[in-house]
Amino acid sequence: MTLAAALPIDRDAVRRIGRFRILRELGRGTIGCVYLGHDPVIDREVAIKTFLPSMPAMERKRFEEQFINEARASGRLNHTNIVTIYEAFSEGGTTYIAMEYLKGTELHRLLAARHKFSTSDVASIIYRLAGALDFAHRNNVVHRDIKPSNIFLVADNQPKLMDFGIARAPNRVADDFAATNDAPFTLYCKENLLGTPNYMSPEQATYSPVDHRSDIYSLGAVMYEMLTGCRPFMAENIEKLLEKIAHKAPRSPHDIDPDIPEGLSAIVMKALQKRPEKRFASAGDMAEEIKRYVLAGKRRRREDRMRQGEDNRRNMDRNTDRKRDRQQEGTSAGLFDKFFRNVLRKS
């Protein structure tokens, strides 16, 4: 993360943010916009996240903490499967983050369109995300909001983890304002629930202390939805949803769809354990378990091919033997007929 010079945003028509020339708008939400920009210094395209110009100053202040927290958290992480932050700035009413411009689509859009992922694709995507989380955790960053809309898929289904806005990380801005017994371990802050309920861990749902194993649970919830097409828990309101997350066990993916391999289903269910100590000890352990599952599958398929090849060779050998036997029987019968005709002729 670098600090930019203080250059204001043109609020009438956004043509430039900081030193970046704005090319077009990529998307917007309730509080902010993402623009495609051009960095004239490096000569590359970047994605620029900033607030809507019309946002009131008081409301803007509330969300500036998350912006800078995202920059501080992900800006310290250099990993293939984590979006790269190039620059962040917040001063004089101007707040933005310039980051890697990704070409692809968010995972949540694919799930909403009922896209069917193959089990091998699910294993590959979750394996890479678990590796990215393990890297973040080893650098003292806990994401705390793993969900499909924070996962971007680029070419060849390569995932990119995004939006560390409510991450727990060293020098987190929000920690400066939180109570001593709150910072930096929980998601209960200033009467607000931070995070996305459908993918929250039980400890988040009950406002209990969280650590890196909360991310493992949330990644398991994402994997569950990718395999089954449905979320682990659904309810008519947030209170009932949080109660289910805290106390109910979801059906296993294999029970929902017998075509889902039991090995993958077991990995999901371990990640979704209610008690953190019963989950994988680390995201790295989860990645290794997925790797073992994939390698075991390859080994079984190789053995099946070898066994099939041996069966085919045995069948070919049996067919060859039968053909030879028939030829020999035909030859013997022909000799007998010739001998019998000769005997009749002499008699």
Image: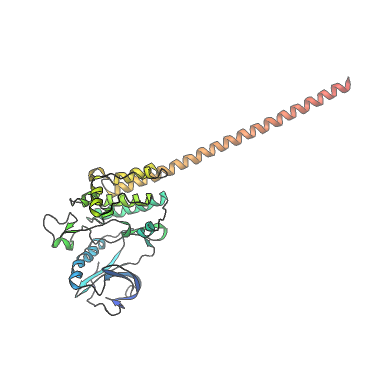
Residue 310 in the image, given as x and y percentages of width and height = 54, 37
**Does the rendering let one see residue 292?**
no
Asked which quadrant contains residue 49, the reply is bottom left
Residue closest to the far front: 236
Apparent side of residue 289 relative to residue 281 in the rendered image (left or right): right
286 up-or-down from 176: above or below: above
271 up-or-down from 143: above or below: above
Apparent side of residue 343 relative to residue 295 in the rendered image (left or right): right
Asked which quadrant contains residue 28, the reply is bottom left
Query: Can you say which quadrant of the picture contains the C terminus?
Result: top right
Residue 177 in the image, given as x and y percentages of width and height = 13, 62
Residue beneath the point at 40% across and 43% down = 261
**Does the rendering let one see residue 132?**
yes
- Colouring rule applied to residues: rainbow
45 up-or-down from 141: above or below: below
Q: Nearer the viewer, residue 65 or 87?
A: 65
95 up-or-down from 119: above or below: below
Residue beneath the point at 19% across and 65% down = 65
Q: How many marks are shown on the rendered structure? A: 0
Query: Can you say which quadrant of the picture contains the N terminus?
Result: bottom left
Q: Nearer the viewer, residue 113 or 276?
A: 113
Residue 283 in the image, given as x and y percentages of width and height = 28, 49
Q: Nearer the viewer, residue 176 or 137?
A: 176
Residue closest to the far top: 347
Asked which quadrant contains residue 8, the reply is bottom left
Residue 165 in the image, given as x and y percentages of width and height = 24, 62
